[in-house]
Structure formats: structure tokens, C-alpha cells
């Protein structure tokens, strides 16, 4: 699954947050900054992916501001 997160997501601890969240839900993949956004590639059990996305929306660092999350399958 590929996610593109737009908003205030750089310089606010967002990538380490994603790493911890992926670890929590036993997901594999990567995260990187891209032109002011953050790209995320994750693989795992569907239920864990669903929980990851839900937590991404509700537990993001307080100084981050997610404007949009685009999700596509790989």
C-alpha cells in the first residue's frame, strides 16, 4: 500500500512517528520526504494496515497538520 500525506508533515517528527506506528502494527516498508509531503510504502495484514491508517489520522504529532492522505495499492 502506498500513501502520500500532504500538509505540515516535515520537520515535525512525522517520519519517526510513522516508523513507530508501522512497528506497532507489525508492518514492513519505508517512509521518505517528497517535495513538502511524506511518501509511505507499507505491507502487512489488511487488519493491521487499516489500524495503521486509522492511527495515522488520530495520533499524528501535535505540531503536524495532515491536509490530505492519498492511498493506492501497489
Image (spheres, rainbow, N blue to C red):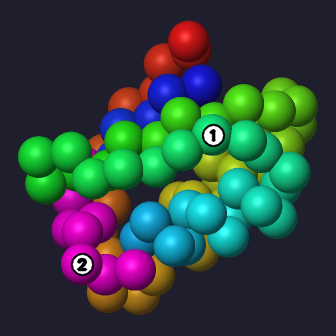
Is 57 left or right of 37, judged from the image as shown? right
Q: Nearer the viewer, residue 7 or 29?
A: 29
Q: Quadrant of residue 64?
A: bottom left
User: Sequence-wise, which precedes: disc 1 or disc 2?
Assistant: 2
* Residue drawn at point x = 77 percent, y = 61 percent: 23
Write down the residue under mark 1: 29
Q: CA distance from mark 1 to mark 2?
A: 21 Å
Q: Position of residue 4 (x, y in %)?
A: 35, 38
Residue found 83% across the figure and 55% down from its top: 25
Residue 34, position as x, y percentages in the image: 21, 45
Principal secondary structure, stretch drawn in magenta = loop
Above-or-below relation of 21 to 27: below
- Residue 15 lies within the magenta run: no
Crowd band around label 2 with a 10 angstrom C-alpha radius: few (<14), some (14–19), many (20+): few
From the top left corner, tell me how far across and down residue 65 is, in percent: 29, 70
Name the residue at the left extreme: 35
Crowd band around label 1 with a 10 angstrom C-alpha radius: few (<14), some (14–19), many (20+): some
Q: Position of residue 12 (x, y in %)?
A: 31, 81
Q: Which residues are magenta?
A: 6-13
Q: Which residue is mark 2?
A: 11
Residue drawn at x 56%, y 14% as measured from the top left: 73
Task: Tell me the SS state at disc 2.
Answer: loop
Amino acid at each position: 500500500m502506498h500513501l502520500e500525506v500532504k500538509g505540515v508533515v516535515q520537520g515535525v517528527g512525522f517520519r519517526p512517528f510513522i516508523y513507530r506506528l508501522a512497528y506497532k502494527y507489525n508492518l514492513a516498508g519505508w517512509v521518505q520526504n517528497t517535495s513538502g509531503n511524506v511518501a509511505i510504502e507499507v505491507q502487512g495484514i489488511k487488519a493491521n494496515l487499516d489500524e495503521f491508517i486509522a492511527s495515522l489520522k488520530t495520533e499524528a504529532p501535535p505540531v503536524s497538520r495532515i491536509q490530505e492522505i492519498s492511498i493506492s495499492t501497489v
